[in-house]
Image: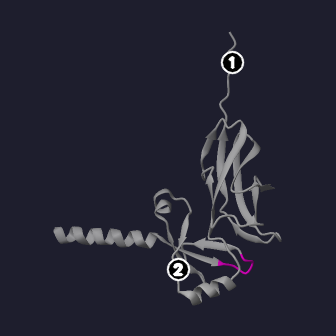
C-alpha cells in the first residue's frame, strides 16, 4: 500500500512539471509568440508560480547565462520584450458600475523602453496609451475586447498581448408606478 502511494505522488509531481512548460519564439516580422508546443527555433521558458496558480500569462526566461561570450552575442541582437499581458481588466471579468471609465493595467517585461509606445485596440478601435497604466473613457455596458501592443519609435511592432474579453454591467433603477 505504501509503495503504491509513493508511485501516485511521483506521478503527480511528474505531471505538474509537464504542464509548466512553455516555448517562446520570434517570427519573421519580429513578433514574439508563446505556446505550450515547441516550434522550430523556439526556446523553452518556465511558467512562473503565479501563472500556474492563477492562469495569468506571465513567463520567465529560463535560458542560462553563458558568460561573456553570450553577453556579447546578446548585445548584437535587437531588443525584444519577453512578455506583455493585460492584468486589468482580467480576461472574462465582469465589471460593475464603472461609470464609463475603464482602468487598464499591463504587465510588460522588461519595462517600456525609451521611445517605445503602447498601442491599444479597444473594441477594434486603435488608441495610443501613455504607459502601461491608463484609463479608457466611454466604456459602457456590454461585452468588450481589449488588446495591447508595444511599438518602437519607427512604428515597428515589438510585442502583442493576447486579446482580452471582459464585460461591463450597470445597475439599473426601476421605478414602480402606483
Q: Nearer the viewer, mark 1 or mark 2?
A: 2
- Look at the image and tell me in which quarter the N terminus lies: bottom left
**Which residue ends up furthest to the top in the rendered image?**
178
**Which residue ends up furthest to the left in the rendered image?**
1
- For residue 36, which quarter of the picture? bottom right
- Is the magenta region chiefly helix, strand or loop? loop
Cα gap from disc 1 to disc 2, whole angstroms: 62 Å
Q: Secondary structure at mark 1?
A: loop
Which residue is rendered at x = 68% and y = 74% of the image? 80
**Residue 144 seen in this snapshot:** yes
Nearer to the camera, 53 or 177: 53
- For residue 24, which quarter of the picture? bottom right
**Residue 38 seen in this snapshot:** no
Residue 134: give x, y in percent of width and height.
71, 50
Q: Is residue 4 magenta?
A: no
- Above or below for 120 versus 155: above
Label 2 neighbourhood size at 10 Å, few (<14), some (14-19), many (20+)? few
**Which residue ends up furthest to the right in the rendered image?**
154
- Above or below for 45 versus 175: below
- For residue 113, which quarter of the picture? bottom right
**Which residue ends up furthest to the front in the rendered image?**
68
Residue 64: give x, y in percent of width and height.
50, 81
Which residue is rendered at x = 66% and y = 71% of the image? 81
Label 1 neighbourhood size at 10 Å, few (<14), some (14-19), many (20+)? few
Label tally: 2
- Above or below for 131 versus 35: above
What kind of colouring is applied to the model shown?
A: one colour
Which residue is rendered at x = 51% and y = 76% of the image? 62
Bounds of the magenta span? Answer: 26-30
Q: Secondary structure at mark 2?
A: loop
> On residue 175, which mark appears?
1
> On residue 63, which mark appears?
2
Amino acid at each position: 500500500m505504501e509503495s503504491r502511494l509513493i508511485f501516485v505522488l511521483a506521478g503527480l509531481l511528474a505531471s505538474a512539471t509537464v504542464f509548466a512548460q512553455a516555448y517562446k519564439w520570434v517570427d519573421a516580422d519580429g513578433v514574439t509568440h508563446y505556446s505550450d508546443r515547441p516550434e522550430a527555433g523556439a526556446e523553452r521558458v518556465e511558467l512562473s508560480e503565479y501563472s500556474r496558480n492563477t492562469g495569468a500569462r506571465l513567463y520567465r526566461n529560463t535560458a542560462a547565462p553563458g558568460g561573456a561570450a553570450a553577453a556579447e552575442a546578446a548585445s548584437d541582437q535587437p531588443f525584444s520584450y519577453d512578455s506583455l499581458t493585460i492584468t486589468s481588466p482580467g480576461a472574462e471579468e465582469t465589471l460593475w458600475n464603472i461609470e464609463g471609465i475603464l482602468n487598464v493595467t499591463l504587465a510588460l517585461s522588461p519595462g517600456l523602453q525609451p521611445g517605445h509606445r503602447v498601442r491599444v485596440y479597444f473594441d477594434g478601435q486603435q488608441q495610443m496609451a501613455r504607459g502601461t497604466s491608463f484609463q479608457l473613457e466611454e466604456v459602457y455596458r456590454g461585452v468588450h475586447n481589449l488588446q495591447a501592443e508595444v511599438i518602437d519609435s519607427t512604428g515597428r511592432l515589438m510585442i502583442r498581448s493576447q486579446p482580452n474579453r471582459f464585460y461591463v454591467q450597470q445597475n439599473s433603477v426601476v421605478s414602480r408606478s402606483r
